[in-house]
Image (cartoon, helix red, strand yellow):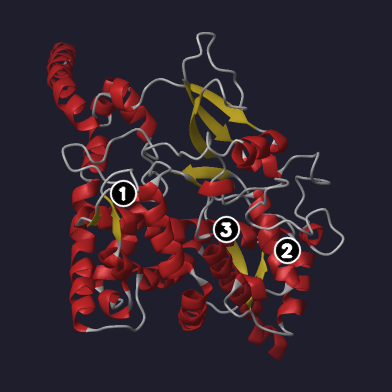
Amino acid sequence: MEAMQMLLTVALALLVFLSAASFRRGSSKLAGDTRRTHPATTTIQVRDAAVARRMIFDDADSFSNHPAAPFPVDLDAGHHKTTSINSAPYGQLWRALRRNLTAGVLHPSRLVPLLAPLHRAAAAALVANLNSSLVTGAGEVVIVRDALYDAVFGVTARLCFGDDAVGGGAGERAMREALREFFHSGIDAGVLARSRAGRLLRWRQWRYLAGTRRRLAELFAPAIIAARRRSRCRAGGVRSYVDTLLDVCVPAGESAVDRRRELRDDEIVRLVWEFLGAGTLTVVACVEWTLARLVASPEVQDKLRRELIDGTTGGDHRDMPPYLRAVILESLRLHPPVPFILRDAVIGPDSRAEPPPPPDGSPSPVRFTFMAEEIGRDGKAWKDPEEFIPERFLTGGEGEDVGPVPGTKEIKMMPFGAGRRHCPGAGLAMAHAGCFVETLVREFNWAPPDGGGVGVDLTATHALFIKVMASPLRARITPRKEMLAR
């Protein structure tokens, strides 16, 4: 038996050695030459809000580029290069893509009329979903994340594709599950990119990432084809995000005088994936963290509910009741969905940023990581920064004039980034969060699973780029109608 085990061990070692040699050649083609596409840079973490403000606003020209890829694994290897609004370099292409999104989809004149019916339908479906999970009656413990995810994704998908292109059938379910699987896969993309041994030992993860582009194309192709047919058959009417992507023309080069071109289908796929991911996962994380804080703070939950029974939200975060807005902002301060924000800068002799350029005056590539979570918990800006105190955002509080996106004068929190590259969907995310938090607090009482004042696990983890609760929120819910009938 020992001889057999030794033979198997030797055979396995030989197989690994031979596989590594061939894998090195294949993976270099797939990953790209990391020394060329991802040059070694100095990495600096920025924790001070005043320093962050000076960099992002006063030296905006130096700090307007995000990393070219959200993680150092080239999903475009072997294909035409694609980009997203988040990863596009600051320039003409980025301006065209962002302008298309903000003017074609997110402008209040277009967005607000669409959101009201979408929010009503999604909120009703969410309440029905949670009620159906109460098998033994009121006061049962539920896990809200999956039901919330379905509701948020449904709204985001309809803004992206339109009703007739999604339909709520197998296609939508496949997209929803692919998004959930990708972001909650537990893949450490950094290890895969840095180490050939890591790619060899985690070959299933590597193969999964390498096949992402193909799977996305297969998922979104029917919806894109349907949108293209729809755009040819009608003029005017409500336009989805995909409709705008089919019509937009972007610069063929970075010069403003260059000719313009339409987007390729693979570029549309990348932008659709960005829209669905950012529009769903950040909102789900925000609402779940908010509910967790309300479960742990019943007095805040009661105060919020008293405010909500006197009125309703309009689907636009600017019309939120003040305490609901304060609760969501306080949740975002403590739990920004993206806890750090990356900017790539080339520090030259004329830059006012730190660190100074090299003595020879040559440009120095530097990656800056703005620690959004730590900035939001800075004791210099906030009293009792680790405590959940929504009142700080009401009149007279230290956050009275603070919103989800900071202005040029001061940064106290930056859950959606800051400056030129802040998230253009911040207003939409606030509207979604307001709708779902309002619905869930109005319709249900939320209590810890053990029935006491403890039992909420606030441990965090990362789902790729999004900071989420390590354990999905478990809470004991009771429909408000039943409580009032007692």
| Label ID, residue 286 | 3
Tell me residue 35's x, y (percent): 31, 20
Alpha carbons under labels 3 and 1: distance apart: 42 Å
Res. 379 image quadrant:
top right
> Which image quarter is the N terminus in?
top left
* Image height of 464 relative to 369, above or below: below
Residue type marked 1: Val
Identify which residue is drawn at 27% across, 48% down. Answer: 258
Q: Nearer the viewer, residue 165 or 11?
A: 165
The answer to which of 233 and 319 lies nearer the viewer is 233
x, y percent for residue 438: 63, 74
Q: In the displayed image of the protein, which residue is found farthest to the right?
A: 396
Q: Can you identify the residue that label 2 sits on?
A: 326
Tell me where residue 291 appears, x and y as whole percent. 63, 63
Furthest-top residue in this view: 360
Q: Look at 32% across and 30% down and name the residue there.
A: 192
For label 2, the SS is: helix
Q: Residues within 10 Å of mark 1 (few under 14, many from 20)?
A: few
Residue 451 seen in the current view: no
> Which element carries disc 1, helix, strand or loop?
loop
